[in-house]
Amino acid sequence: MQFKHCFQRLLWHFDRSLLTRHAWRTLLWPLGLGLFFLLLFWLIGLLWPATPLSLATAGGQPRWAETVGLFFSGAQFPLRSSLPLFFQLLIVLIGPLLIAAFLTAAVTVILLNRRDNLRQGRARYHFANHVLVLGGSSQLLRLLDSVHNKPELQGRPWVILSSQPTPTLRDHVMAALPQAARSIPLVFYHGLPTDPDALRSCQIELASTILIIGEDNQPDNDQCNITAWNHLRTLRSSATLLAQCYLYVDNLLSLQLLHDLPPESHTSLETTVINRFETIARQTLISPGPDGAHLTLDRFLLSPDSDRRVHLVIVGITPMGLAFASAAAQLCHYPNFNPDSARPLRTCITFIDPLAQQKVDLFKSRYPGLFQLSHITLRSDDSGWQSSRPDPAYGDFLDIEFQFLNGSVHQSWVRQQLTSFALDPHQVVSVAFCDDQPSHNLSDALSLPAPFYPISDSDDPSAATPLIYVYQPLDALLARSAQTEVPRFHNVVPFGMPDSSLDPFESALTLLAKRINYIHHKIESGKPVATIPSEPASLNNLWCQLSIAQKHQALHAASFVDSLLRTTSSLAVNNSDPADSDPLTLAFAHLEHNRWIMEMLLDNYLPLPANQRALLNQALNCDDNQTRQEAAILNKRHANLRHTLKDIAPFQQLPAEVQQHLLTVAQLYRRAF
């Protein structure tokens, strides 16, 4: 009975070895049995007594050589040997049987297991200095398409860890792989990016670049990505190699929460947080150059003496719509805004959504500081316009206002309102369709009222023709066909496609942000800025010391530089004395301050009431040292604990040192960019 149990235990180990990912263990069985029988036969032959007959027919070979020869090949049976014939026959029957049947079958199983393990993503290998991708979302193809813009990612293996079925993911990626990424060695692993053991199997301590992109159609995608990021920081706590980490999130709220984190305490991981929707919106709205003037919201038309204003209409209060509005609110600051005018030319952002009335309250609770300072109007079909003005205790100085239309683009009163926007000669109108359903976006865009698709406009087509942005996250074939093949729809611009030229790393923008950070660091440290390095290597040390929020602020400032220089350039042309750059520098500083205010409000910072702001500034500038110290402590407590900033105020009410700082920044921006 004991022998039976041992034999069954032996068979269980053998069967389990066929399913293990350690395929070499399966090979041990035939090799072990073959070696056992070979040694057994050799010992028997060695100890077998020689008979006169066997001695008469024996050859000159030793018995161990005869035994091995018969074991691996029975072609020479029977041999002239001292071994008995029946013993030779036994060796011939068992040896080739093990080799031809057992060993061949085992090798076949090994190869099949290796193939299946590779296809299913169960096989694991050793890598160093590799690119690790956590997740298999559609962002992966966009990342692979951008490899040519990132020399440090070229020529390195990419290890992709995803919870999706590996064969399906591999087939999809390989079929749609961009030409620029054909030479990249791709390795697909199956596992959960939130599992520490799965992360360890990817040699995360040796990876040089880590991309946390998550999965498509995963409700808690941001939570999973942040969980994987936290495991990553823990597992890399003792790593010596600095890794670049890109953490992708979809929700703007996740981005705001990550902004509150302090700078990373260790130097083995440098994290850049990227919101996918914000990246798409920002790169769509930033002009690629002079040839892309017709793609900007202002069409390069808003000079300091212009009587027009930008009006952006966003259809759908979705994550993409909110990101589009956020990017526009930080870009649309123009020199023709005068807060002291009877009717200031504020940039208007209008949302159209059937649930707009409910979402206004959500916005007010999410962005209390922004709505304390903003002009807000709401209209529904049955209640007309409902308006709210900024709180008088804070002042009225923002150059952005918001409207909400509680309806859909198919309702007659909404279409009438849109028609009035398009026909207003004092507005530069753009419409962005940002619904979650791409087909709805295109059909709604192509069915806009006739003024959005004028037949001809010989006077100023770029100004009079509205621009129609259409969000197409899957494929833009139909939208591009309408744009290029139907003259009427020439102003339809699809965006957000996986095969578009958008750079998910924002390489050029990040380099510009690093240069801007270099400028601010020099100003704050009181050092002169002779030249600004143009290579990333000389800027990375300062960049690594920033928190996630500070990096994001530098990226926003970099996004605004091109628009800022362009909209203030006409002042330099009209200036009678070229050497006198004060009007240009002052306008530049005004607009940069307006942009900074909007950025802080969108990051959930609050303003101080005007009277408290004046008292705090007065205390910070008084002659008494103790009063200044107490005011500085109070100001820091406002910023860190209450998330309140005293400099969210009109430019004229800023302290003199803050105004001078902005003027210095403006001068350096003009010289550097």
Image: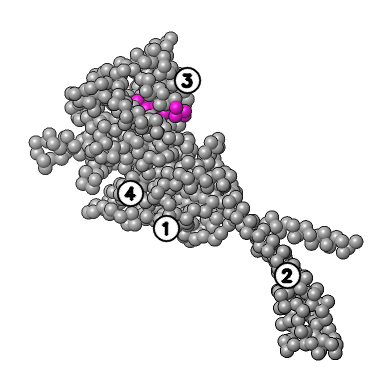
Q: Which label belongs to residue 96?
A: 2
Q: How far apart are marks 3 and 1 (CA)?
A: 49 Å
* Secondary element at image label 3: loop
Q: How far apart are marks 4 and 1 (CA)?
A: 22 Å
Mark toward the start of the polypeptide (2 vs 4) = 2
Quarter of the image where the N terminus is located:
bottom right
Are the two marked residues, 4 and 1, in contact with CB atoms closer than 8 angstroms?
no
Seen at 52% across and 38% down, the residue is 216
Residue 198 is situated, as x and y percent measured from the top left of the image, at 59, 52
Q: Which residue lies furthest to the top in this view?
A: 382
Q: Is residue 334 visible?
A: no
Q: Which residue lies furthest to the left in this view?
A: 576
The residue pinned by badge 1 equals 155
At label 3, the amino acid type is Leu
Seen at 35% across and 22% down, the residue is 375
Residue 434 is situated, as x and y percent measured from the top left of the image, at 42, 28
For residue 87, above or below residue 413: below
Q: Distance between the residues labelled 2 and 1?
A: 47 Å
Q: Which label belongs to residue 511?
A: 4
Seen at 40% across and 44% down, the residue is 504
Are the two marked residues, 2 and 1, in contact with CB atoms closer than 8 angstroms?
no
Q: Which of 222 and 593 is in front in this view?
A: 222
Q: Is residue 6 visible?
A: yes
For residue 97, above or below residue 79: above
Q: Magenta span covers which residues? A: 429-439
Q: Which label belongs to residue 355?
A: 3
